[in-house]
Structures are given as structure tokens and as C-alpha cells.
Amino acid sequence: MKRPHWFDFTLPLAVIVVQVWGSAGAQNAQVHPGDPNSRIPLDALGFSLLAAGPVGLLVRRTRPVVALCVAAVATCVYVGAGYSYGPVFASPIIALFNAVQTGHRRAAWSVAGAVYLFFVCYTTWLVPAHQGWLHQASIGAIILVVLTAAEMARARREERAERERVGEEEARRQASEERLTMAQELHDVLGHSISLIHVQASTALHLIDEHPEQARTALATIKQASKDGLTEMRSVLGVLRDGAPRSPTAGLDQLDELVARAGPDVTMETAGDPRPLPPGVERAAYRIIQESLTNVTKHAPGARATVTITYGAEELSVRVADGGSTGPGALADENGGNGIPGMRERAAALGGSLTAHALPAGFLVEALLPIPPVAGDEPSEDTE
């Protein structure tokens, strides 16, 4: 969490107050005139050293190693000059913790080692009452506790940052997948509608002089196809609005409308026991049928086509077969598109398969999509 800028000045000021006020109080129990082991009373130099360490904390964000060195040197000079022990160690502890947190671990451990060596030498040879190994071990333990706490805090912060980074990458990946899904949905919607409009417009132009009533029927089909295409496109683009569903809404419940738009030469059959299916399976089945009927409109106009939906125990079969056309398709002169590869990708994304091949008369598209088994039909383990 990012701290406010005023905290950069408040913390050093608070540490100055604690070190000066606490050290002034601590010297009452450590300054004994005439005692060779007495600490010396605070003077201008002592107060300056007490303030120097906290002042160095002002640059702890931009120059953490400089802040650590200033605090460590000021503390060592203060103790080496003979002033009383007390909260003077607050500033180097904060600076040491900050250096580890900001990634300057080598400098932190090096300065900590140098401070420890200073205290070992000072308490062993430079004070009248020499201290033993237990005192030196206590100093080392305190320094290690500070460093360990800093390392643990740094590790937790890095772990939290890594989780946030992974979460952001996952969100970007999901957003990218949603954009690809919407692009594919738009391709299918527009491809189907425009192909149908193209074919019907060609039919209307061909019949408008000799058979105006049939041309009127083709124009009515164009009107309805354009209206339905716009409605479905708005539905797909609706996922961009706040609070809208995060997936397009095409499903098997709209198949009747799709088949009706395709014309009287298309029939639909259902086998098995219909049941609710996962939205992804319904959407894939709908788009596969839509793209297959679009291909019939493009390449075999007027051909009779049959759409067969079979609900199996663990898979949904989608079959679209047409009987072929006696004349060239209205869009036969166009290059092949991505219709069949796109359908195959939809099926494969769900763990299914799709085959598309020519028949002796016509064309067949068949997809097998895995679906959850019927409740009560799951295989059970035999007990011995």
C-alpha cells in the first residue's frame, strides 16, 4: 500500500522526538559522576547525533542505502562517544528494515555486519567493564531478528505483488478471450445475415420482372434477415455494457427462428431426450448450425437441408446435411472463407470434434460435443 507523502516527514520527526526525549530520560539512570563505568551526559554533539539518524530517514525512499549508512554511522558515533544507551537504535532499525524492503538486501546485511563488529569491538575493548560472549550473542540475535523480520515482510510483499500480477494477467487473458469470442460471434452473425441477404437480393433481381410476387417474398426475407441480424448483433455487443452478461446469448432455444429464416427447404429433427446444456455447448451448437446453413445458402441455394440434433448420454450430435444444388451458388465465385475451420475450432475448444465432407449429392457437416451425463446415468463403482 502506498503511503501519503506527509508520512515521509512525519516518521523522521516522530523518531527524533522519541530518540531525544527517550535518551534524555535514559541518561538519568546511566550518568553517575565519579563512576568509571558512567556514561557521559548529553551535550550539543549528543543531541545532534540523536537527530542525525532520523534526518537521514528523509531520503529512505529515494536513497535507502544512504539513509541506512547515515543512521548506522550516527548511532555508532553516538555510542562510541560514551553517551547513554536508549532509543538511539530506533533510526538504524527502521533504516535497516527499509533497505531490505526496497531490495537492497546485500547493503543491509553488510551494514548490519559492520555495526555488529563495531559493537563487539566496543564492548570488548573500549569500555571499562568488558562484556563477554553472552552480551555479544545478544546483540547479534537482535540484529538477526530485525533482518529476519524484514526478509519475511519483503517475501510476503513480493508474494502479494506476484498474486496481483498473475491476477492482472489472467484478467487480461480473459478479456482477450472474450474479445476473440465476440469477434467470432460477430463474424458468424454478419456472415449468415449478409449471405442470406445477398442470395435473396439476387433472387429478387432475377424475378422482379417476370415473377414480382416471388420477388416480393425475397424482399420480405431480406427485411426480416436484416432486422434479425441487427438484433443479434446488438445482443453480442451488449456484453460491452456494464452489468451485461459476459457471454453471447445464442442458444438452442433460438434454433426454430434460425431454421425459419433459412427458408422452407430447411427442416429440423430432434432425437433423444432434450435437456438443459451448458451455455458454451448451446452457443457452439447454434453457431455451427448457423454457419452450415450459411454455407448452404452460399454454395447450394435452393437445396433441401436437414438439421438433426441428437441428445446422447454424454455427447450432443449436431448434423447438417443438404442434397446439393442443380445450379451454381450465388456466392460461388468467392474465395473460401474460415467457416469450416471456425466451426472445427469451436468444437475442439469444448473437447469435441467436427467433420465436414461432400456427399454423393450434397454436403454434410457433423459435430460431436461432449455434454454432462444424464442424472442417474453416471457410472458407479462396483463394490466387492
Image (tube, rainbow, N blue to C red):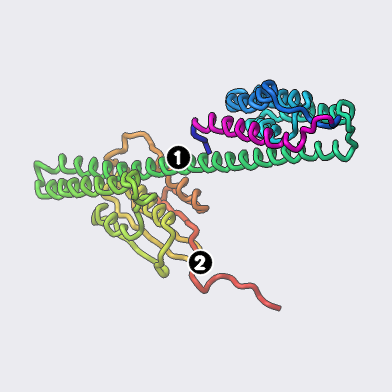
Left or right side of 336 for 224: left
Q: Position of residue 210 (x, y in %)?
A: 9, 44
**Numbered circles on residues, count:** 2
Left or right side of 18 for 224: left
The residue singled out by tag 1 in the image is: 176
What is the residue that sits farthest to the bottom in this orientation? 384
The residue singled out by tag 2 in the image is: 373
Assess whether residue 361 is covered by the magenta stretch.
no
> Can residue 295 be seen in the rendering of this structure?
no
Q: Position of residue 164 (x, y in %)?
A: 54, 41
At 20% from the left and 40% from the top, the residue drawn is 202
At 55% from the left and 70% from the top, the residue drawn is 378
Q: Position of residue 58 (x, y in %)?
A: 58, 26
Question: Which is nearer the eye, 144 or 321?
Answer: 144
At 53% from the left and 39% from the top, the residue drawn is 1
Above or below 276: residue 171: above
**Over which residues does the magenta segment extend?**
6-34
Question: Which is nearer the eye, 101 or 200?
Answer: 101
User: For the residue marked with disc 1, what is the amino acid?
Assistant: Ser
Above or below 247: residue 136: above
What is the residue that sits farthest to the front in this orientation? 34
Q: Residues within 10 Å of mark 2 (few under 14, many from 20)?
A: few
